[in-house]
C-alpha cells in the first residue's frame, strides 16, 4: 500500500481517461480530418535542421507570440503561448482560482473542473438550460461575491452551440475586477466569429485559442491566450520555463504562413457539417443539435447499442451520455467525405435497429 502522503484532492480526482480504438475511421476527438501536407512537413524539417538541438529553446516563444500578436492586432505582450490550451487552463486556475472559485457550466470541457478540484479551488458548476442555452441569470448569481475565474467554451463543448455575445458581455460586467472571464474559443474558426472585441473592451477577459483544431496540429500541442498585458505577465509566471520546444515553435510558425490550407480545411468542415446534420435529422429516432464547431452532438434512444454498432462498422465516435443534460447523446467529429459516408451508412443501419425517440423537444431536464 502506498505510504507517502498524497493530497486528498488528488486522491479523490478520477484520472482523465481515453481509450484508443483500432477501428479505421476515427471520429471521436474533434481533430482535423486531414494531416499537414507533406510539403509543409518538409519545410518544417528544413527549418529544424538549422536549429541547435543541444541548446534550450527560448525561455518563452516570443517570436511566435509576436507573429500571433500581429495576426490579432494586439501587442506582443498580450499573447501567451503554451503547450496547448489545457496548460493555459491550468495556469489560469493557478493564478486566479487557487484559494478562490472556479465557475463554469455543465456539461462543458472537463479540464476546467478537473483543474479546479486538483488545485483545491471551490468549483461551482451551473447547469445549462434546455436546448443547452446559457444560464445567464444563474451564472450571474454564482459570480456575485466571488473572486476567481469563470470558464466558458464558445462555441460550447461538447454541445457545439454558440452563446450570444451580449449575454457574455453582461456576465463579464457582473464578474467585475475580482474574476477573470476565460472564453475558450478552440472552435472559433468553424463558427466564423469570435469575441476578441470583448477582450479589447474588458481587461478581465482572456481568450484561449488552439492550433489543434482548424490548424490541424493536435500532435504539436500548441495553444495561446490573448489577454491584457498585465494579466498575460502573471500567466507566464505559472508556466514552466523553456516549456515550448523548438519543434513546436517551428511547426506552429510554419502553419501561420499556410492560411490557404486552413481556410480550405474550414470550408470542408462547414460543408460536411451541414451534410451530416441534415442526414442525421432525416433518420428515425435521431435528434442532432445545432453546431458551430467541427462536431455534432446527437441524441438516440440507445447510445450504448449505437456506439457498439458503429464500432462493428469500423467507426469510432464519442459517447457523451454520462454527462448531465446530455443523456442518450453521442458526438461525432466531422471527417473526410469518405469517412462521413461510412459513418452515415453505419447510422442508417443503427437507426433501423433502434427504438425511435418520443418527441424532439430538446435535452432532458438538467441535473
Image: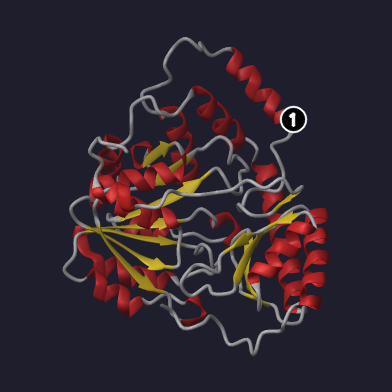
Q: Position of residue 47 (x, y in %)?
A: 60, 19
- Mark 1, Cα crowd under 10 Å, few <14 / some 14-19 / many 20+, is few
Asked whether 161 or 7 is in front, the reply is 7
Tell me if residue 196 can be seen. Answer: no
User: 258 left or right of 310?
Assistant: left
Q: Quadrant of the N terminus?
A: top left
Which residue is drawn at the image coordinates 82% and 59% (left, top)?
342
Q: Position of residue 109 (x, y in %)?
A: 46, 58
Which residue is drawn at the image coordinates 62% and 67% (left, top)?
330
Q: Position of residue 325 (x, y in %)?
A: 48, 75
Which residue is drawn at the image coordinates 33% and 30% (left, top)?
240
Residue at the extreme front of the image, as rendered: 1
Q: Dot 1: what SS?
A: helix
Tell me if residue 154 can be seen. Answer: yes
Disc 1: which residue: 38
Which residue is drawn at the image coordinates 29% and 41% (left, top)?
235
64 vs 340: above or below: above
The image's colouring method is secondary structure
Asked whether 300 or 197 is in front, the reply is 300
Q: Quadrant of the C terminus?
A: bottom left
Q: How many marks?
A: 1
Q: Quadrant of residue 236?
A: top left
331 vs 141: above or below: above
Q: Position of residue 37 (x, y in %)?
A: 73, 35
User: 15 left or right of 220?
Assistant: left
Q: Quadrant of residue 295?
A: bottom right
Amino acid at each position: 500500500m502506498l505510504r507517502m502522503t498524497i493530497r486528498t484532492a488528488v486522491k479523490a480526482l478520477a484520472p482523465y481517461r481515453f481509450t484508443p480504438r483500432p477501428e479505421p475511421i476515427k471520429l471521436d476527438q474533434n481533430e482535423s480530418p486531414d494531416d499537414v501536407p507533406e510539403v509543409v512537413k518538409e519545410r518544417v524539417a528544413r527549418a529544424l535542421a538549422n536549429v541547435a538541438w543541444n541548446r534550450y529553446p527560448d525561455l518563452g516563444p516570443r517570436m511566435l507570440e509576436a507573429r500571433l500578436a500581429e495576426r490579432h492586432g494586439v501587442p506582443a505582450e498580450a499573447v501567451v503561448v503554451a503547450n496547448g490550451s489545457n496548460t493555459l487552463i491550468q495556469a489560469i486556475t493557478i493564478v486566479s482560482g487557487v484559494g478562490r472559485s472556479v465557475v463554469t457550466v455543465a456539461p462543458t470541457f472537463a479540464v476546467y473542473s478537473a483543474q479546479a478540484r486538483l488545485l483545491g479551488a471551490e468549483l461551482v458548476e451551473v447547469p445549462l438550460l434546455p436546448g443547452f442555452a446559457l444560464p445567464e441569470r444563474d451564472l450571474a448569481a454564482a459570480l456575485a461575491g466571488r473572486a476567481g475565474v469563470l470558464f466558458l467554451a464558445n462555441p460550447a463543448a461538447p454541445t457545439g452551440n454558440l452563446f450570444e455575445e451580449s449575454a457574455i458581455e453582461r456576465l463579464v460586467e457582473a464578474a467585475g475586477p475580482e474574476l477573470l472571464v476565460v472564453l475558450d474559443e478552440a472552435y472559433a474558426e468553424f463558427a466564423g466569429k469570435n469575441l476578441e472585441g470583448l477582450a479589447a473592451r474588458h481587461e478581465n477577459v482572456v481568450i484561449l485559442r488552439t492550433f489543434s483544431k482548424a490548424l490541424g496540429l493536435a500532435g504539436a500541442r500548441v495553444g495561446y491566450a490573448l489577454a491584457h498585458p498585465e494579466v498575460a505577465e502573471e500567466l507566464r509566471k505559472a508556466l514552466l520555463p523553456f516549456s515550448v520546444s523548438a519543434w513546436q515553435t517551428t511547426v506552429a510558425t510554419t502553419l501561420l504562413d499556410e492560411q490557404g490550407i486552413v481556410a480550405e480545411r474550414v470550408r470542408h468542415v462547414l460543408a460536411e457539417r451541414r451534410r451530416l446534420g441534415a442526414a442525421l435529422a432525416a433518420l428515425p429516432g435521431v435528434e442532432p443539435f445545432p453546431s458551430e464547431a467541427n462536431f455534432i452532438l446527437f441524441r438516440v434512444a440507445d447510445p450504448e447499442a449505437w456506439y457498439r454498432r458503429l464500432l462493428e462498422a469500423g467507426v469510432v465516435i464519442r459517447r457523451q451520455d454520462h454527462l448531465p443534460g446530455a443523456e442518450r447523446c453521442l458526438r461525432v467529429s466531422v471527417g473526410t467525405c469518405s469517412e462521413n459516408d461510412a459513418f452515415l451508412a453505419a447510422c442508417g443501419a443503427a437507426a433501423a435497429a433502434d427504438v425511435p425517440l418520443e418527441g424532439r423537444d430538446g435535452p432532458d431536464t438538467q441535473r
